[in-house]
Structure formats: C-alpha cells, structure tokens
Image: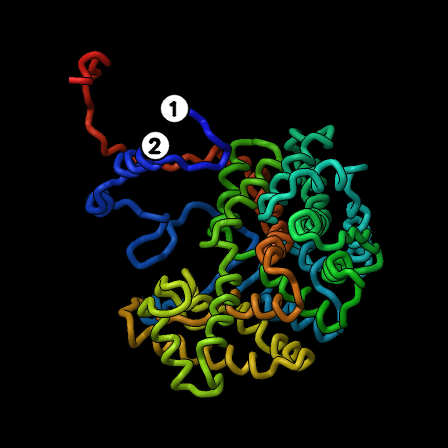
C-alpha cells in the first residue's frame, strides 16, 4: 500500500472502505430482538435514563390521567425557569451571561457583591499565554473553527503546570479560564483563517475588562469594534439560551463520559467540542440560514403563503435545497409543542430585525414557523407534534449580527462551555464509576486459517 499524499483517497482506499462498511453492518432486526436502545433512545424517541443531574431540566410533557401528553416546553437552570432569568436581567437592562454562569456553576444566584467579584475573576482570565496567538493560533490555521478551537484547548494543557490535577478547586480554575478564553480562541482562529486563506486584513483586538462577554465578542470580532446596545444584548441572550440543555445532549453526555475516566480538563473539553462540531448537534443553524437563502431565491413572493408552502412541501419531497427531505430548524428530540428557547428568543429577534430593516425576512421566518408544522403533520406520520427549535432563529440572529458563518458553531461552544464545566464538576463531585455501557456481540466464532491456505 503506497502513500501518495496526505489527503488523497485512492481507488484502493475506496475498495477497503467498502469492505469495512460491509463488515460493520449489523442486521437491524437484531436491535429489536435484543431490545437495544439505539442512540440511547426507546422506540418513542425518549432518552434512556443514564444518570442524574442537578444542573438543568428540560420539560416537554406532563402526566394526565396516567398518560404522558406533550406540553409547551420549559427549560430550567438550577430550578429557575430560563424565561424568568432572561426577563429578570433584561427588565433591568443588564447583561446576564456572567450571572447565569455563576448560577450554573455554584447553584445560586449571586448578589451584587458576588457577581462583581466573579465578573472581575473572569475578566482576569481573559489573557492568553505569551506568544500563544502567534505560535499556536497563527500556525497552520484550519478552515474549520471548531477544529482550531479544539486544537487550542488541547495545546493549553502544555501551559498548565497542574494540567492533570483533578481536584475540584483546580478543575474549577481551569474551567473558568476556558470560559473566559473561548471567545478569543474562536475569534482569533477565525481572524487567522480569514487572513491567510482569504487574504483579509488581520485584526487582533485585545478584550476590554469593562465589557461583558457578549460585548467583548463583538469588540474583538469587528474591525472597528463598534456595535449597538441591542446587538450586544441579543447576543448575550443567545449565549444564555445555548449555555445548557440537560445532561442528555450529546456533548454534555460526552463531558460526563470522558470525565468519568479521570482524564484532564483540556481533553474533556476538546472531546465535547468534537461532539458539538457534528452537524447533527451544533451545526443546525447554518443549515437553517442556507435553507432560507435558497428559499428567498426560489420563492418569488415571500408574503404568498401558497408559494412558501409549496417550497416547504418540495423540501420534504427532496425536491428543493439539499434534497435531504428536511425542513431545518423545525423539530426537536424532546420538544414537540414548543421550544422555550425559540419562544424567548423570538421577541428579541423581531426587535433586531426592525433595527436592521429586515422586517420582510422576519415575516418570512414567522410564516415558515407557522406553516412548517402543518405541512410536516400532513406529509408525514409522526408520533408527536413538531415545532421550531432554537436553531430556527439563532442563525437568523447571527446573520443579522453579520457574524461569519464559520463562527456560528463556535458561538454555540462559547456558550455551552459553561454547561460542560458544570457537568464536569458534577461528575467529579459525585465520584462515580467510569461510564461503560454494554454492547452485545453478535459475531460468530471462527477458526484461524493459515495465510497460505487463504489464497485457495
């Protein structure tokens, strides 16, 4: 087997991959025979109970006369309804990222003195090691910012004299540093990519201690560092709505699994980043934006319900956009009647669309939000209702904020690092066993054959 180039896929490799695929296929009837919960879900899509958490709660159903029925979704952080948290700081015209981070990590809402002290602590950690940007981020920039982020996180291990110390004070210190550094790692990685791959001017702005996390993101990213108060507030809310979503989502579960092996914080968070990078988890809002871009080109009159409905139907029939048969941003593994994050987000999204002069686009999104569930229920048999999810509007928001699409998923990570940190601390605090689920072997025993006899 001769190696030609690092990225080349040779005909021989295609042949070997075909063999590997055939070797890996398992008769689907066996999953039913042995009652295997594929994807750790039962036949109704309900997740298998794999652990306990005190961090957040996702509610989408209730028991009525002994029967579980869908309800409008609710999301709770440490027992507080996220809707109430957002309304609380928004009504006082405050940013909420730092406050909600404190809540998720320490199980209490901070008073003013605690919040000020915690904010100063996070600000003190917004400083990368000397020459890190030049020696690490600027070298061999990737065209995928999640890859860049994971690589940077793993490299920080080498700068930490207590990298392998899994005591709770040390892990908390590491997590707080990563929460503070994620915006810089992500945005500087994008700036390097944009400069070396696209020939754009290189901007490396230092964060300002007096700014909130959301403000710093816009300050660091934009060449002129300018932003409106509404832009920063909506980005702040977006970060809070993406911070955490129960222990069962793929990347948080990954955090528990890898933490249970007692490996270091950097390896755990890099694994979680790898999970979130997957398009089934963190990249859905990109698909939503691209789908709407295609819709706006193909639908002549955005206000015509018949034309929009026809496009959505063609999406389901695999006759439009990417021919996947999906209406992106609609549907969720847990929520059926409504995703609380999308409900909370919508009113703020409308305000931003007015500031940007994009009311027609917002009207189109609202129409699709109303029509898509009707069309899906008509075209496909489903065991539960369907509604839009948070990705439906988050991509539109990021587009209005003029964020590059390469940063959509890293923005998710900048938020979710808070939840991952809380889950890592929770796993370590409970001193559980290494997570090791069972896989049933379905292969048959075979006798070894000497290589000379295999040619016969």
Instruction: Report crowding for label 2: few under 14, some 14 to 19, many 20 or more residues within 10 A (C-alpha).
Output: few
Q: Picture coordinates of residue 1 (x, y %)?
A: 38, 24
Residue that badge 2 annotates? 12
Q: Are marks 1 and 2 in contact (CB under 8 Å)?
A: yes
Mark before the other along the chain sequence, 1 or 2? 1
In terms of depth relative to the viewer, which is nearer, 415 or 257?
A: 415
Q: Picture coordinates of residue 188 (x, y %)?
A: 71, 49
Q: Tell me if residue 106 can be seen.
A: no
Residue at x-position 63% and y-position 75%: 348
Residue at x-position 58% and y-position 44%: 147
Colour mapping: rainbow
Label 1 secondary element: loop
Residue that badge 1 annotates? 1
Up-down relation of residue 356 to residue 278 (above or below) = below
Image quadrant in which you'd find residue 255: top right
Q: Picture coordinates of residue 269 (x, y %)?
A: 59, 42
């Amino acid at each position: 087997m001769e190696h030609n180039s690092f990225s080349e896929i040779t005909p021989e490799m295609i042949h070997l991959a075909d063999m590997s695929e055939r070797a890996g296929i398992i008769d689907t009837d066996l999953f039913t025979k042995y009652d295997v919960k594929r994807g750790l879900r039962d036949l109704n899509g309900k997740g298998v109970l794999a652990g306990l958490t005190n961090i957040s709660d996702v509610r989408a159903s209730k028991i009525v006369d002994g029967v579980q029925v869908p309800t409008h979704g609710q999301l709770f952080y440490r027992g507080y309804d996220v809707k109430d948290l957002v309304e609380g700081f928004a009504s006082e015209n405050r940013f909420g990222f730092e406050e909600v981070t404190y809540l998720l990590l320490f199980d209490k809402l901070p008073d003013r003195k605690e919040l000020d002290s915690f904010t100063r602590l996070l600000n003190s950690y917004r400083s990368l090691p000397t020459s890190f940007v030049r020696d690490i981020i600027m070298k061999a920039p990737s065209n995928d910012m999640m890859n860049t982020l994971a690589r940077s996180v793993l490299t920080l291990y080498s700068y930490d004299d207590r990298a392998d110390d899994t005591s709770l004070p040390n892990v908390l210190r590491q997590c707080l540093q990563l929460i503070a550094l994620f915006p810089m790692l992500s945005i500087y990685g994008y700036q390097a990519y944009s400069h070396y791959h696209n020939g754009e001017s290189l901007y490396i702005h230092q964060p300002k201690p007096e700014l909130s996390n959301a403000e710093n993101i816009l300050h660091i990213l934009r060449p002129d560092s300018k932003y409106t108060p509404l832009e920063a507030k909506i980005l702040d809310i977006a970060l809070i709505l993406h911070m955490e979503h129960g222990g069962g989502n793929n990347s948080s579960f990954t955090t528990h699994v890898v933490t249970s092996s007692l490996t270091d914080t950097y390896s755990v968070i890099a694994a979680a980043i790898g999970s979130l990078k997957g398009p089934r988890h963190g990249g859905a809002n990109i698909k939503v934006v691209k789908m709407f871009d295609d819709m706006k080109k193909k639908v002549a009159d955005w206000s015509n319900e018949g034309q929009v409905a026809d496009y959505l139907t063609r999406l389901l029939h695999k006759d439009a956009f990417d021919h996947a048969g999906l209406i992106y941003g609609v549907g969720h593994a847990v929520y059926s009647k409504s995703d609380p994050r999308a409900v909370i987000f919508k009113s703020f999204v409308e305000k931003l669309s007015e500031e940007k002069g994009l009311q027609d686009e917002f009207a189109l999104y609202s129409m699709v939000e109303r029509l898509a569930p009707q069309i899906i229920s008509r075209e496909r048999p489903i065991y539960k209702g369907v509604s839009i999810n948070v990705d439906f509007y988050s991509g539109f928001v990021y587009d209005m904020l003029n964020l590059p699409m390469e940063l959509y998923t890293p923005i998710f990570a900048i938020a979710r690092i808070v939840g991952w940190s809380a889950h890592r601390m929770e796993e370590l605090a409970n001193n559980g066993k290494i997570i090791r689920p069972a896989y049933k072997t379905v292969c048959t025993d075979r006798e070894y054959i000497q290589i000379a006899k295999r040619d016969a």
